[in-house]
Image (spheres, rainbow, N blue to C red):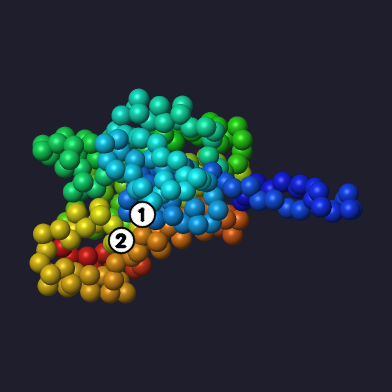
Amino acid sequence: MRNLLHIRDPTSRKPSRCTLKIMARTILITGGSSGIGSAMVRKFLDEGDSVWFTYLRGAESDPLHLDNELVRAFPLDLGDYSSVSSLVQSLPHIPDVLIHNAGVGSATVRRVSEKLHEQDEAMLRINAVGTLWLNDLLLPHFKDRNYGTIIFLSSVGGGITQVPGFRYSDGMSKAAIAFLGRILAADLAQTDISVFTICPGATQTPMFEASTLAGLDSTSRERLIAALPKGRMIKADEIAGLAYFLTTDAAKPLHGAVLDASMGLGVNPGLLQK
C-alpha cells in the first residue's frame, strides 16, 4: 500500500478542500541488472515507484535503469557478509518492499570456481545464507515500523517440486529460500508485514539460457521449449507483474503463500527434459 498524504490545495478558496497525493514507495530488488530482476525494476518504475537495485560488483548494471531519476544501483555480493552489511548501511532509508531476487544457478555458479565442491558451497552460501544475512539485517527495521512487504524468489525445482537433471546444491539452496519464506511468514502472521515466495519455472532469462538451453542444437532447443507447459517459456515480465501484484492490498490474503509460478511445470516436472 502506498503512503498517502492529504495536502491542502492552495488553489482552492475552500480551506477544507484537500487533494490526495500519492508518495512513491521505495522498492529494494537484489540482482536487478538482468533477467527477472531487471524486469521487476522496469515494472515498479513504470508504476511510479522509486527503485533501488543491486548488482554484482564488476558486472555491468543496466544503463536503461539508470536513466531514470527514481532508480539507484548498489553493489552487492551476497556471498560476502561484509558486502551485505555495507549495502544495508548505505541505504538512505529502509525500503517499503524488499525483493530477494539475486542468486546463482547451476551454470552461473561456475564463475566462482572450477572445483565442484566449491561451486556447491558457493551455491548454498550465496542463494541461501546470503539471502538470510540480508533479511536478518533489515527485518528488525521492518518490525519496528510494522509495515512492508518481503518477497523471496525461489524456483519450481526447489520450492515446489523436484526437477531431475539439475545440480543438487541448486535445488537445495532454492528449497532453503522457500523454507525461509514460510517460517518468516509464520513469525510475522500477526503483523502488518506481508511475506510471499515466488517459484518461477522455465523463464526466458540469461540464467535459464546458461543452465538449460546452452549447448543444445536448434532442433533440440525447439523440442524442449515445445514440451514446456503452454509450449513456451515464461516471460520475465510475467513474473515481474506477479511480484508487483503481491505488493498490493489485493494480495494480503495470500500472506505466507509459496506460489507455483511455473505455468504448470510444478505439477508435471517431467515435461522439462534436458
Residue closest to the eye, 73 or 264: 73
Numbered circle sitting on residue 107 = none
Q: Is residue 226 left or right of residue 44?
A: left
Q: Residues within 10 Å of mark 1 (few under 14, many from 20)?
A: many
Say whether residue 180 is visible: no
Instruction: Work out whether 56 lies above or below 266.
Output: above
Instruction: Work out whether 216 lies above or below 151.
Output: below
Comes first in the chain, label 2 or label 1? 1
Q: Amino acid at mark 2?
A: Thr
- State the image coordinates of residue 237 (x, y, percent, origin top left): 40, 61
Numbered circle sitting on residue 203 = 2
Where, by quadrant of the figure, is residue 77 drawn? top left
- State the image coordinates of residue 110 (x, y, percent, origin top left): 16, 42
Say whether marks 2 and 1 touch (CB < 8 Å).
yes
Residue closest to the eye, 21 or 268: 21
Q: Residue at x 29, y 43 (%)?
A: 60
Q: Residue at x 26, y 44 (%)?
A: 104
Q: Residue at x 76, y 48 (%)?
A: 6
Q: Is residue 119 left or right of residue 176?
A: left
The furthest residue to the right: 14
Q: Residue at x 89, y 53 (%)?
A: 13
Q: Which residue is mark 1?
A: 36
Q: Secondary structure at mark 1?
A: helix
Say whether residue 252 is visible: yes
